[in-house]
Amino acid sequence: MILTLSASAVRAYIPGVYVGGFGIACAAIEALTRQLAAELGPRGIRVNCLRSEGIPESWEGVSTESWSGSPAEIEAQVKARSLLARATVLADVGNAAAFLASDRARATTGTVFNLTSGTVVD
């Protein structure tokens, strides 16, 4: 099992938040995930990607000069944009990773798990 990580920057545009090439890099990771799944699937190797939104716990001690506000304000902005009115937390990502790595997901490969709480809808 190979698990890659991406972010909402691949699909979302948020006015005033500039991600530069990060969105392009995330798109490349997601394309690589699909390509590896196609190449490695016949060998029994599954490849999936986790796409998350900004995770509040990861903002502790990070300079937010390029963002519009403090970590608490950014979390409020994420919640306001989210269809679920919540921010994705580390436990959400860990639970999804544990599921994808388990035999319960043995029929899942080449997919991007959307963990954005609805800030991105594919």
Image (cartoon, helix red, strand yellow):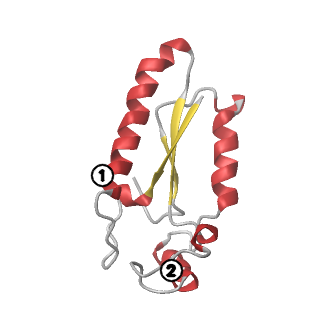
Q: Of the residues under marks 2 and 1, which one precedes in the sequence?
A: 1
Q: Amino acid at mark 2?
A: Ile
Q: How many marks?
A: 2
**x%, y% of residue 18?**
31, 71
For disc 2, the marked residue is 74
**Residue visible at 50% across and 75% down?**
78
Image coordinates for residue 29, horizontal then vertical, percent: 40, 42
Quarter of the view holding residue 68: bottom left
Is 15 drawn above or below residue 24 in the view shown? below
Above-or-below relation of 79 to 21:
below
Looking at the picture, tell me which residue is in the foreground, 62 or 116: 62
103 above or below 94? above
Q: Quadrant of residue 91?
A: bottom right
Q: Pointer 1: what residue?
A: 24
For this rendering, which residue is in front, 65 or 32? Answer: 65
Q: Secondary structure at mark 1?
A: helix
Left or right placement of residue 15 versus residue 46 in this view? left
Residue shown at 41% from the left, 22% from the top: 38
Give the label on residue 81, or none. Answer: none
Whether residues under marks 2 and 1 lie with C-beta atoms below 8 angstroms apart, the answer is no
The 10 Å Cα crowd at callout 1, few under 14, some 14 to 19, many 20 or more, is: some
Q: CA distance from mark 2 to mark 1?
A: 22 Å
Dot 2: element: helix
Residue displayed at 55% across by 80% down: 71
Q: Identity of the amino acid at label 1?
A: Ile
Residue 55, x across and y down, in percent = 57, 66
Please tell me which residue is depicted at 60% across the width and 76% down the height of the picture: 61
Q: Seen in the image, is 5 located left or right of residue 99?
A: left
Horizontal and vertical percent position of residue 112: 47, 43
Neighbour tally class for label 2: few under 14, some 14-19, many 20 plus, Cα within 10 Å: some
Quadrant holding the N terminus: top right
